[in-house]
Structures are given as structure tokens and as C-alpha cells.
Amino acid sequence: RKEVEQDPGPFNVPEGATVAFNCTYSNSASQSFFWYRQDCRKEPKLLMSVYSSGNEDGRFTAQLNRASQYISLLIRDSKLSDSATYLCVVVMDTGRRALTFGSGTRLQVQP
Amino acid sequence: DGGITQSPKYLFRKEGQNVTLSCEQNLNHDAMYWYRQDPGQGLRLIYYSQIVNDFQKGDIAEGYSVSREKKESFPLTVTSAQKNPTAFYLCASSMPAESMNTEAFFGQGTRLTVV
């Protein structure tokens, strides 16, 4: 089983739609959680950190469910510019303390 | 400006040759990482280093080597033992995992093509 799993998509949605991605992680010792965005042939960039209480940044909302070991990203009012791959990232609390990436979920927002 | 720099952006090598990818950061980060990304795939960890003069293997270290002689620099050598070296290589840095903020900053990547 992969340490971090995501639905690869693609998610094809119309402009203005609300879309949600989930990501599950296998190691309960996971400490920190992030969503990164990666545009085609570019480096990943931090979209937002994910806090235990949930957090919101404009049209983006991230949630963490430690009991079920998953994190989610909700995008409201999708824009064409939101088209990208969204990567779930987990940092373990013990053992290997490196950022572990999911394989990404591709989002295509259509006009 | 602070940042992380990878060079070169594109690299072509003949099969059987070793090649070294450069990664330099001036963010004063202790931790540095090398990832490999293949088309349509996520990032896979090759090596990482939490502190100078120390580094650990990631999931796909075979055929690669690294050094961490300076805090700012974490070069990756792709050796001839790497069976399938053509890929997009990404270097990243962050504060240590023990810190409150482990956001990783990435270089622009090096596209290696072995012919």
C-alpha cells in the first residue's frame, strides 16, 4: 500500500463548479500535511498547509481527519486558472522525516 | 532574493555516462531533498539530507549518489548504474521536520534525457 494515495483523475469540471479531492495516508505518525499545486512541466508550489482544525484560503478549504487518516481539498467557484495537478504531501513524525508526495490529482476546468 | 536554484534546466547525456545535477539554496534551510518525476506520475524520493554531512536513501536511491558538504548545496549524481535515468529531477529544501514549518521550496527542475 502506498504511503499517500490520491485519485489520479482527471477531474473535468465546468467553470464555477465546486470540486473536492481526497487523499489518504497510511502512517498514523504523520505530523504535517500540505497541498501543493503543480502546473504542467513546472515545479510544485505550496497551495496551503492543512491544520487539524481545518483552514480556508479564499476559494480553497482544506480539512484533516486524523481518525480516518485522510485530508481533503475543496475548491469553490472553479476558475480556468485552477487547472493543474494537486499533490497531497505528508511529513512523518518519526522515522523518515521527508516530505512524501501522493501521485497527484489532475483538475481540468472547462469553459 | 532567497531561493533554490537547479542547473542546468535541460541536460542531455549519452548512455553509460555519469552526470551531476546541481542544487543550491540560500534560504538557510537545513533539509534538502531530491525527487524524480516521470510523465504523469507523482514525485518519488531519491535522497534527502536533514543536516550537513549526513543524508539518507529515499525510495529509489539505486543508481544515484549525493553529497552534502555544505548547507547550501546538495548535488545529485546519476550514475551509469541507473537503468532508466531519463526523467524530470526536482530539488527541494525546507526547515527540518522537527520545526513548526516544513513547507518545501522547489527548484525549477532539471530535465535529463539520456540517449
Image (cartoon, helix red, strand yellow):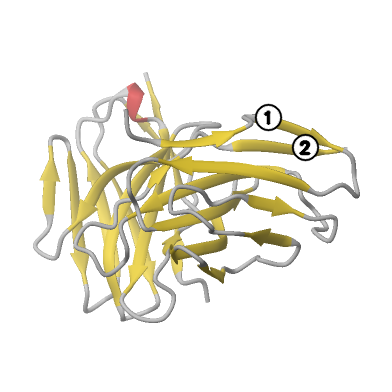
Chain of the residue displaying label 1: B
Q: Which residue position holds label 2? A: B113
Q: Residue at x 22, y 57 (%)?
A: B101
The picture places residue A94, in percent across and down from the top left corner, at: 35, 81
Ranked by sequence position, the earlier of labels 2 and 1 is: 1
Q: Position of residue B17 (x, y in %)?
A: 87, 47
Quarter of the image for the C terminus of chain B: give it. top right
- Tell me, yes or no, if residue A56 can be seen here: yes
Near mark 2 (Cα within 10 A), the count class, few <14, some 14-19 or many ≥20, is some
- Asked if residue B112 is positioned above or below residue A81 in the image, the reply reads below
Identity of the residue drawn at 53% across and 58% down: B69
Give the camera-side residue of B17 and A41: B17
Q: Disc 1 marks which amino acid?
A: Tyr
Q: Residue at x 53, y 76 (%)?
A: A1
* Mark 1, residue position: B10
Q: Secondary structure at mark 2?
A: strand
Q: CA distance from mark 2 to mark 1?
A: 8 Å
Frontmost residue, A38 versus A24: A38
- Quadrant of the drawing holding the N terminus of chain B: top left
Q: Are marks 2 and 1 in contact (CB under 8 Å)?
A: yes
Amino acid under disc 2: Thr
Crowd tier of the residue under label 1, counting other residues whose Cα lies within 10 Å: few below 14, some 14–19, many 20 or above: few
